[in-house]
Image: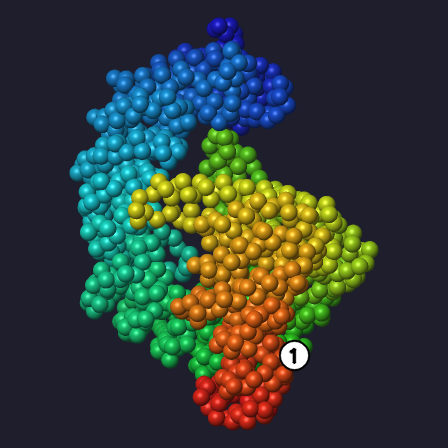
Amino acid sequence: MALPIQVHQALEELVGFLQSTDNAIRTQAEEQLNRTWVTERPEMLFLGLAEQMQGSQDEGTRAYAAVIFRRIATRTSKSAQTGEQTETFLQLNAGQRNEIRERLLQGYAGEAKAHVRNKIADAVAEVARQYTEETVMGVDGTRDTWPALLNALFQASQAEDSAVRESSFRVLETTPGIIEKQHEDIVLGVFQRGIRDDVPDVRLATMAAFSAFFQSLQKKAQQKYYALIPDVLNTILPLKEAGDSDQLSKALMAVIELAEAASKMFKNVFSDLVALCISIIQDKELDDPARQNALELMATFADYNPTMCRKDPNYTNEMVTQCLSLMTDVGPDDDDASDWNAQEDMDFDESDSNHVSGEQTMDRLANKLGGQTILPPTFNWLPRMIASSAWRDRHAALMAISAISEGCRELMEGELDKVLDLVVPALRDSHPRVRWAGCNALGQMSTDFKGTMQTKYHQIVLPSLIPVLAASEPRVQSHAAAALVNFCEEAEKEILEPYLDTLLENLMRLLQSPKRFVQEQALSTIATVADSAESTFGKWYGSLMPLLFNVLQQPNEREVRLLRAKAMECATLIALAVGKERMGQDAITLVNLLGNVQAGITDDDDPQESYLLHCWGRMCRVLGQDFVPYLQAVMPPLMKLAQAKADIQLLDDEENVAQIEQEEGWELVPLKGKYIGIKTSTLDDKFMAVELITVYAQNLEQGFAEYVMDIMDTVAIPGLAFFFHDPVRVASAKAVPQLLNSYKMAFGGQSEQYSELWKSTIAKVLEVLATEPAIETLAEMYQCFYESVEVSGKDCLSNEHMGIFIKSAESVLKDFQIRVKARQEEAADREDGEEPDEETQFAMEDDQTLLSDMNKAFHTIFKHQGQTFLPHWERLLNYYDLFVTNQDDTQRQWALCILDDVLEFCGPASWHYHTHIIQPLIDGMRDPAPANRQAACYGVGVAAHKGGDAWAAFAAGSLPMLFEVTRRPGVRSDDDVFATENACASIAKVLHFNAGKVADVQGVVAAWIETLPVVNDEDAAPYAYAFLADLIDRSNQTVMLQAPRCFVFVAQALEAETLQGAMAQRIVGAASKLVTDAGLDANQLLAGLPPETQQTVRAFFG
């Protein structure tokens, strides 16, 4: 039915007022729209706006009617029918919705003006989205999917007017879900016609729609659309030949999305695509974004299908060549680097530059294709480029070394001498940007080859890099100082000590630089040096600390705030390095200065505020309990940050979205046609504050107790369920055990105060084990749980607690099995050599971490609850049985470790489950995975040690398999040594606790000695060497016959520090007896060992 004319007049007038430039008129019109129309008669509003779109003579009115329609349709409010939050349009009855939809499509089909049609298309797409995402019932009671829309769009895709054809694909792009399975054959033809359309705009719109549709499909359903790929690629070449950079860029973006979704569908055309993209990257007549998108498309294949890239004969050589070429496109019209030198904004954004694109792509290629693939073509160019007379070539070569070092770490690490021969001379180059790039390369290499660079090459790097601090260009000075941060933060104090004087003299001079950014960097570098040099920094304390105090005593002018923040950081790191005693009264002075800084912060954007949080944490570590009196000043602002609520805005207006996008510190999350704006800067501060609370609780223990209850109630427990920000949940999970410990230290574990806190806390912690949605964060919640139980100790969990834990664990294991099955199906679809994408690899790592932390939770419960946990644990027996026979190494390890806990903490009662335990341990000792052999060997040992008579025969019968573990090839390799040493310790346990079941004890002892030493596993070593000490004490003849070897095995364990405290003293006493009884020459035996071992052992034996 058509609306009365007076309704149309009223609406037309209202639409006019809503577009008024007068704020007062517009505000009044908005109020009238909401009060009179949206609230009281929404069906008339939508129908009227649809009729305005269809019938108004004014194109501005038609367009704005569509904008209002879409805006109001997306609004949500509580439905009178269901009581749930529902979009306004879906609250109309089915008949009203049908009529409005029909008018909407009529308006869309009849609109002659392209810009108006696009606005109406947006309104159509919004309504379509609601029908796709929600289950909307039609007049007949079945689900309504708005089939008329798809017919209308298919018709529009064949219209004579190309603008109509284009707009039909625009709607399909935004709502691909309206295409259902039964339409697939039809839609294939629709897309094929669109991609072959004569008009470029239609082809591009089709590609974008096809890309969106393709990504919405399940993997198996995607395959029938592979046939479209040649047509998709055929759209690119004409755009390149026409030099149409904008359209070419859009087309490449659509192909990038397709490559991300299913890289293998390009397999048959990949060589042609490589050639085409390389020709685009090379074409300097095209705009940079188009060339960069061609590079991005090629890099996407490296990300998602590195095997296909490696197999292509031209891909790697061409990509490396083009990346290096783009990297020479640096500093145009600035040959002498005068503009570059004058630039003081170190955060200047060059992300859209060709040279940055080249660098980032080289980094991706190295990480995805690896050193064996990337290094040959790269080093085919680099020596020539380093030797080039053109500074841009030299700069690009050095930046390439920076870019590839992480991905090529394994191969480059053995060739660092040659790489440094290329890089170090650049620090003396005539051009400042080349020297800057040399510093960059050394800084990156110091991180990527950490350890090796510091221990083997400090005598090359530091004497070459330190003089660059005296360069004439401030930017080069600053970057040399930044590179030294990378080197020093990974260096031991013994390595730095010989260089400290020269290094700090140069850095002190930089503090006098007229450039503030140089001063700031110098302070950061001094702070890092102090952190690494520790007590050896004391010599420089007297020179530096007064300078830093002076900076902090200056007025808090805006332009020096970052400098003051860096001075605080530097002073507190020096304080940590030299300690409370060396600082004396300066420690109190520094705390008071920090207090003054805190009191002077008034602006939200003051960088001192975030630095200050960490500075307080350091001073807490420096002062220990002496810091407690300062908490009354420190805690109120910290609690304000920690208690902050999420600042969230629902944005349904494009102007609001655009405004938020321009502001820093916001994240936009799409949701049902709207956006949620989350102010992440507030949440980052909250996260940092919770982290600092953990530092205080950990360091001050009982001294922090008075704050615990308030923090637990208002910060930590609510933080566990703070779903707006994963890091806040993680920080809260780490805080809870430390807060519990603080309170326990103050009041005692059995006190009423602690019992009340524990009761409320454990209930909430158990709750989040069942509600946490993110796998990575769920692992942290399990860690929170077991650390909390560890704090509370024996019998702290009730039957109800254990029941809730098992119920949550079962749910987690079910979800885990679903994820594993999905990954297996995905793996089956991958072609030979095709690797799982990065997201899948991360998901697998997250699951491994989750299983590991669940293991520790089971272990901790068994440790503190013993047999009382068994009735609950039994509920998951079928999972242990499934996991322990699974093909996945991690799942077998998970089950074996839990079976070990049953044996260790339930003793003879564990025999009740022997049918579930014995075969897994037997299979585990022969498992190809070393970690699983280790777990199984350990299990046999605890069965012997804790299992009593019931397990004795099994333990003794396992000896041949334990010896088998110690005789495999490579038993002392890094991967296998822990399994070997656990087998050794378990044999000792069997001989010690179950000797009565062993047929030839002396023969087994003789063979066991061959399995020593234990020099890696600190848990296994005490059992092995305690047994050896017992044998020595009893003057066992087998040991006496092998006395020299046994003495050496003791010496090796002492040097490796696998024996500590009383156990070390016991074995030293036994070894002394062995030397005397066997008449050994200890000095002669020690002479065959390395000098450091001799020194350590002589110290033990006096």
Label 1: state its secondary structure: helix
Q: Position of residue 1003 (x, y in %)?
A: 52, 76
Q: Position of residue 68 (x, y in %)?
A: 48, 22
Front residue of 895/645: it is 895
Q: Amino acid type of disc 1?
A: Ala
User: Looking at the rendering, which quadrant does residue 240 occupy?
Assistant: top left
Front residue of 1027/660: it is 1027
Q: Residue at 73% of width from left, 47% of height from top?
A: 799
Q: Residue at 55% of width from left, 74% of height from top?
A: 1000
Q: Position of residue 274 (x, y in %)?
A: 22, 46
Q: Is residue 548 visible?
A: no
Q: Is residue 939 visible?
A: yes
Q: Does residue 396 appear to the left or right of 964 in the view shown? A: left
Q: Does residue 783 appear to the left or right of 817 in the view shown? A: right
Q: Does residue 417 appear to the left or right of 510 in the view shown? A: left
Q: Residue at 75% of width from left, 64% of height from top?
A: 745
Q: Quadrant of the C terminus?
A: bottom right
Compared to 1037, does 835 lie above or below? above
Compared to 136, does 581 lie above or below? below
Front residue of 845/297: it is 845
Front residue of 375/129: it is 375
Q: Residue at 81% of width from left, 58% of height from top?
A: 751
Q: Position of residue 1083 (x, y in %)?
A: 50, 93
User: Looking at the rendering, which quadrant does residue 347 occupy?
Assistant: bottom left
Residue receiving disc 1: 1062
